[in-house]
């Protein structure tokens, strides 16, 4: 999914700050796990793969459903690669979903993102649906109470973190669409890669 950063920042920032954004929803003196990296796999793996994705992106959904299960089974679970997820929301709904995903315990982040991406037709692209209510249903299945959900989607500190990380990645790597992958900081590609193509980039970066 392509986007222009200026239009995204204006639309998302205005839409979210127009609501009742609340700072300090979480204890200030406690380590904030929401801001820690979301990573799977062997921390000592020789190859690190990073993915920037948006939770309303149909191309990200295709990769998550068709390719990522093979990547996880054959490459992550076997310790061959370390996989790092980066939130890169391209619209307001994707931003809300990323805020919810970041609020869940780290081990629930990837399963929740997979559930969100596999349900785009139901929660994001159904014009008759209450998008926020449908997203909350998915969060509830992941074990998030309604009160926690409301705090997550109205937390200014969390929104600032996601947008700052996104802006820095766009400036550093010139990311213009999702999903975008980097293999060992050597190879970069923006495409919903097939498993065979994914392995080819691994080989180039290895």
Image (spheres, grey):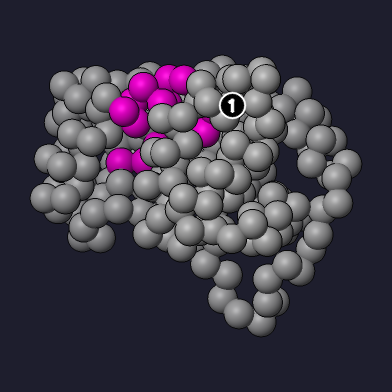
- The residue wearing badge 1 is 124
Q: Position of residue 185 (x, y in %)?
A: 34, 39
Q: From the viewer's perspective, tell me whether residue 53 is left or right of residue 4.
A: left
Query: What range is drawn magenta here?
Result: 49-65
Q: Is residue 23 visible?
A: yes
Q: From the viewer's perspective, tell me whether residue 51 is left or right of residue 173.
A: left
Q: Position of residue 31 (x, y in %)?
A: 56, 76
Give the quadrant of residue 15.
Answer: top right
Residue appearing at x 79%, y 41% in the figure? 16
Image vertical order of residue 65 relative to residue 36, above or below: above
Image vertical order of residue 60 relative to residue 159, above or below: above
Q: Residues within 10 Å of mark 1 (few under 14, many from 20)?
A: many
Image vertical order of residue 21 relative to residue 170, above or below: below
Q: Position of residue 115 (x, y in %)?
A: 42, 39
Point out the residue furthest to the bottom here: 29
Locate the C terminus by quadrant: top left
Residue appearing at x 78%, y 28% in the figure? 11
185 or 93, which is in the foreground? Answer: 93
Q: Is residue 165 visible?
A: no
Give the quadrant of residue 5.
Answer: top right
Secondary element type, mark 1: loop
Residue appearing at x 60%, y 45% in the figure? 136
Asked if the magenta segment contains residue 39, the reply would be no
Asked if the magenta segment contains residue 61, the reply would be yes
Q: Give the total of numbered labels.
A: 1
Q: Position of residue 34 (x, y in %)?
A: 55, 61
């Amino acid at each position: 999914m392509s986007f222009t950063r200026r239009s995204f920042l204006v639309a998302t920032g205005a839409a979210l700050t127009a609501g009742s954004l609340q700072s300090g929803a979480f204890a200030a003196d406690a380590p904030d796990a929401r801001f820690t990296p979301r990573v799977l796999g062997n921390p000592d793996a020789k190859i690190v793969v990073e993915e920037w994705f948006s939770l309303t992106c149909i191309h990200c959904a295709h990769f998550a459903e068709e390719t990522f299960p093979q990547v996880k089974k054959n490459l992550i679970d076997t310790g061959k690669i370390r996989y790092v997820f980066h939130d890169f929301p391209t619209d307001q709904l994707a931003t809300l979903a990323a805020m919810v995903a970041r609020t869940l315990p780290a081990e629930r982040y990837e399963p929740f993102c997979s559930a969100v991406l596999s349900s785009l037709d139901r929660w994001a692209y159904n014009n008759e649906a209450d998008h926020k209510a449908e997203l909350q249903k998915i969060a509830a299945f992941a074990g998030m109470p309604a009160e926690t959900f409301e705090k997550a989607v109205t937390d200014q500190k969390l929104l600032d973190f996601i947008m700052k990380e996104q802006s820095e990645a766009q400036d550093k790597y010139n990311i213009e669409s999702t999903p975008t992958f980097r293999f060992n900081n050597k190879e970069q590609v923006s495409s919903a890669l097939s498993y065979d193509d994914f392995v080819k980039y691994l080989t180039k970066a290895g």
